[in-house]
Image (tube, rainbow, N blue to C red):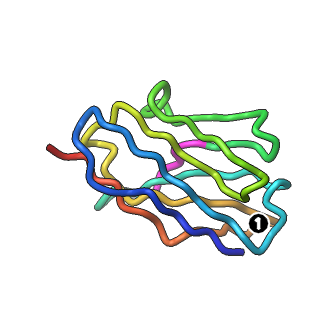
């Protein structure tokens, strides 16, 4: 299993970013996917989840209405569209999947929201 995140960067408050996570090594279309984030000194927190068929999405209260998770099973890629970004969204963002009790993580992509 390999997960490779991209799309992070420095953005001003109120701005937008789109994160991507390219997956390989497993049958992507059969698995739910998640985005997590971890800010310095804090625990890793779940940001968003999408089911294998995109039929179900869930969000942390802190990002509801601002972030959108989506996936393209033909491209083996999951996305996180982040709008109206706030300084408190600053973190390393990770994509994640799981199978038989094992968790798989990418290397993360840094998102910094600052003026």
Q: Residue at x 39, y 57 (%)?
A: 8
| Magenta highlight range | 44-48
Q: The residue tagged with tag 1: helix, strand or loop?
A: loop
For residue 101, side relative to residue 3 (left or right): right
Closer to the camera, 31 or 45? 31
Quick check: 72 above or below 41? above
Whether 106 is among the magenta residues is: no
**46 drawn magenta:** yes
Residue 7 percent across, percent down from the top left: 44, 57
Q: Main secondary structure of the magenta part?
A: strand
| Residue occupying the point 53% across, 48% down | 46
Residue that badge 1 annotates: 101
> How far across and how far down the image is residue 11, in percent?
26, 47
Q: Is residue 88 left or right of residue 43?
A: left
| Residue 64 rendering spot, x and y as whole percentages | 49, 28
Residue at figure coordinates x 53%, y 45% from the top left:
80
């Amino acid at each position: 299993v390999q997960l490779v995140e991209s799309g992070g960067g420095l953005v001003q408050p109120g701005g937008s970013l789109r994160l991507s996570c390219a997956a390989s090594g497993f049958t992507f279309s059969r698995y739910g996917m998640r985005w997590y984030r971890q800010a310095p000194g804090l625990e890793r927190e779940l940001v968003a989840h999408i089911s294998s068929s995109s039929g179900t999405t869930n969000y942390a209260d802190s990002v509801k209405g601002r972030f959108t998770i989506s996936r393209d099973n033909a491209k083996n890629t999951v996305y996180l569209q982040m709008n109206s970004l706030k300084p408190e969204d600053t973190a390393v963002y990770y994509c994640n999947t799981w199978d038989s009790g094992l968790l798989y993580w990418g290397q993360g992509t840094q998102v910094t929201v600052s003026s």
